[in-house]
Structures are given as C-alpha cells and as structure tokens.
Image: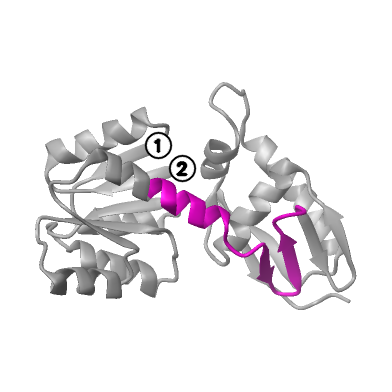
Amino acid sequence: MRILVAEDEVLLAKSIVKILNLNGYAAKAVYNGVEALISVMSGEYDMAILDVMMPKMDGITVSAEIRKKGLQIPILLLTARSEIQDKVAGLDGGANYYMTKPFDTRELLAVIRSFERTQTTEETKLNCGNIILDREKMQLLSPTGCYRLSKKEYQIMEMLMTTFGKGIKESRILEKLWHADEIETREIVVLYISYLSDKLQSLHATIRICPVEDEFFLKEVENDI
C-alpha cells in the first residue's frame, strides 16, 4: 500500500514516513497542500494522510478537491485542533477519519489497517461500459462471453477500471505489480496490455485500452457487434 504523507512539520512528516515504511507500507512525504493534491491526483497513492494546517492549501480543501475530482482513496486528516466543528468540516469535506495531534502510533496503524480491510471488502464487481470485472472469480465478462484472467491481467484491468478515463503510467504498473527483485521492463506491461486488449475486442467491449506516451487509460467507444 502506497501512502502519501502531507505535513508541513518536516520532522513529524519524516517520522511518520519512517514508521509506515518500517511497518511494510511505501510512504512518501510532501510539505504543502498543493504538492499533496498534485501527488494524489497522479494516481500513484492508495491512501493520503493530510495535515489540516498546511501552506498553500489546507488539508480540508485538499480532501474536498480530491473528492470533487472523483478519486475515492482513503483520507486521514491530522490536526492540532480538536474542536468538533473542525472535525465535522473535515469529514464533510470527504475525509474518512480524523486524528488529533499528538497521536498514538498504534492508533495510526490501526486506522490504516481498517482502511485496508474496507478496500478488500468493496463491491465484488466493477462495471465499465458493457464490461464487468468479477473480482472474486477474476473474470472479465460482457453480454457475449467471458474470460478467466491471469493474476497480472486481473490486477492491471482492475487498476484501469478503478481509474477509468485517467492515465496510469507504465512505471506505476511495474512498481505495483512486480517486485523489485524481478527483472522486468516496460515490454512486459505492453505485453499484458495486448492480452487484455485482445480479450476486450473478442468480447465486443464498448471500452478500449488506449496508450498515450508512457501511460494507458480506458476509454468508452462504440460497440463493434
């Protein structure tokens, strides 16, 4: 799980990143709200931890902007303010949880684990166009048939469908689906994309995988039945 930590107190940000990395997460820090929003919208992160009082853009505004743009990653707000109206504003703005500083590391890790459990129990089917991705059976279905996907095919298709219309970099796919000790290059991503594209065409899908420079995204097209 890749986690963005947006906190303008540099020492605290680095401390949180270190704790998360030691507990098996891949964390990175930024130090203002604008950087936070740009980083989250890149699609590279699975969760965001946002300080409320940040320069350039506060955490509540960042959270609201993320939701306006349709991204549904879990958001945890951190703040030194404990007033109920601040908590209400943060949660109404799109945050999933609100923690007051100073906080206990055990609570922080417990909240992250709860986010992970929620993500794994989401709806078992994803829909884009006339295509359904069955998460339980790892099947790609349309009104004309279905395919059982390999693990990597399924993972790539899930990434594309959950970010429909937004580009995903080849490097992001490699980083997320292949371990660092596996020697792979962009060609392996292109190969799996071609497998999926062939399956979509065979299923007479109304969606296509489109390459743009070093990114791929799903686009709705006319059905070719």
Task: Answer yes or no: is residue 46 visible.
Answer: no
Residue picked out by circle 1: 26
The magenta stretch is 112-138
Three-letter amino acid code at the position of disc 2: Met
Vertical relation: 30 (above or below) 65: above
Q: Position of residue 3 (x, y in %)?
A: 37, 45
* Left or right side of 159 for 106: left
Say whether disc 1 or disc 2 marks the residue closer to the N-terminus.
2
The residue drawn where x is 84% and y is 75% is 224
Nearer to the camera, 220 or 9: 9
Nearer to the camera, 198 or 59: 59
Q: Does the magenta stretch include residue 120?
A: yes
Vertical relation: 95 (above or below) 156: below
Q: Where is residue 136 in the image (x, y as percent from the top left)?
A: 72, 55
Residue picked out by circle 2: 1
Q: How many labels does the image show?
A: 2
Circles 1 and 2: CB distance less than 8 Å?
yes
Which image quarter holds the C terminus?
A: bottom right
Q: Position of residue 159 (x, y in %)?
A: 59, 54
Nearer to the camera, 57 or 73: 73
Vertical relation: 51 (above or below) 181: below
Instruction: Tell me which corner region of the image, top left, top right, bottom left or bottom right, holds residue 75.
Output: bottom left
Mark 1 crowd level (few <14, some 14–19, many ≥20, 10 Å Cα): some
Three-letter amino acid code at the position of disc 1: Ala
The residue drawn where x is 10% and y is 68% is 83
Q: Dot 2 lies on which element? A: loop
Q: How far apart are the alpha carbons under marks 1 and 2?
A: 6 Å
Q: How is the image coloured?
A: one colour
* Left or right side of 156 for 116: left
